[in-house]
Image (tube, rainbow, N blue to C red):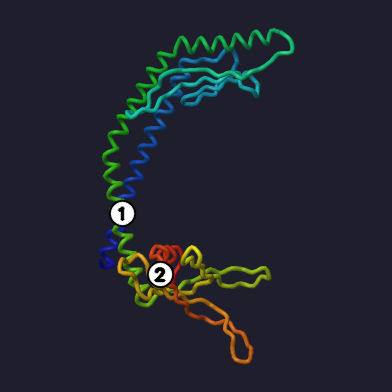
Amino acid sequence: MTNLELQNLETRLDKVNQSITELEKQGDVIYADARERRKAVLKEFIAPYGDDELRIADRRIEVYPKNGNWELCNIYVKDDWKSQGTEYTDMYMTVGSFRTETMEEWVVERFQKLTYYAQAIVDYKDDILARFNQIEAEKSERYAAINPQMRELRKQAKELNETISDEKDRRKLEMLSNEGVQFKGSKREGWDGETYIEYPDFQAKFDERWNGVRGIKILRTSASGKSADVRITIKGTKYNVGGDITKELMSKDVMRVRMENVLKFVNYNETVA
């Protein structure tokens, strides 16, 4: 595959991904619209008792007394997830337990409020559920209209990604087998303020790790192509005649390294072009 052909594939992939993003935005609008419509239904049928504050979500109402920081009750719309989609089947209310030290008018009012909200659920539950299920059906219909196109685009993106990835891996393997690759390393600052270059560590095998690898080259690959013998370049310690010790670049051969470990290492770390 030529460079131009690879660039054309990457351009096609960008366009496909842009189309996917646009469809995802349409899907987000569909779901957001359904949420707002459900909230409007709850607001239409469940009114506050007196000056209570109703905090309405798309499937739940939290009831707070005026200037209160505690919930009087919560009202929920129950849904069931089925193979054909979501179905709203019931409504229920939860109430926190409490105990009074004495009996006063506010206790009576509290139970009056709970009775009011419970009665509202009983009176309007069927209407609310019918409206919720209608909204769900319309949402599913709108989403189904864009779903085939989304599936096709994602299929195209997957195929293009695989083709591009395979070609880049092929090129990387070719380079590794010929001249090998060198790593740029990252500039770091030590505790004393001095800067230095930190090179990547190579986990060749589960029990073999090489630190500060400057370069790597494939010497030969197995018949299956799943493993390779590699030569790495590191900065090691050299003991000279006379007892002098110096740090020098040296090569080490590592046998039977899984090819996926080699490619992961090379792809993850920035190489010299």
Q: Which mark is residue 201?
A: none
How far across and down, in percent of the image, does residue 27 sit?
36, 37
Residue 55 placement (x, y as % from top left): 54, 24
Rate crowding at label 2 as few (under 14), some (14 to 19) or many (20 or more) other CA atoms within 10 Å.
some
Label 1 CA crowd tier, 10 Å (few <14, some 14–19, many 20+):
many
Please state if 248 lies on the left or on the right of 172 as rendered.
Answer: right
- Tell me what residue is drawn at x 27 percent, y 50 percent: 156
Q: Nearer the viewer, residue 203 or 77?
A: 203
Q: Nearer the viewer, residue 15 or 150?
A: 150
* Identity, as a three-letter code, of the amino acid under mark 1: Leu
- Res 66 → quadrant: top right
Of marks 1 and 2, which one's residue comes earlier in the chain? 1
The image shows residue 123 at horizontal and vertical percentages of 46, 9
Residue in the picture at 32% in, 28% down: 84
Q: Residue at x 66, y 70 (%)?
A: 193
Above or below 101: residue 184: below
**Cα separation between marks 1 and 2:** 35 Å
Residue farthest to the bottom? 242
> Which residue is under mark 1?
13
The total number of labels drawn is 2
Secondary structure under tag 1 reads helix
Report the quarter where the C terminus lies. bottom left
Q: Residue at x 65, y 24 (%)?
A: 69
Q: Amino acid at mark 2?
A: Arg
Quadrant where the N terminus lies?
bottom left
Considering only vertical position in the picture, is 67 above or below 115? Answer: below
Q: Is residue 35 left or right of residue 9?
A: right
Q: Say if mark 1 contacts mark 2, CB within 8 Å.
A: no
Badge 2 element: strand
Q: Which residue is mark 2?
A: 256
Residue 251 picture location, percent across and down: 47, 79
Which mark lies nearer to you, 1 or 2? 2
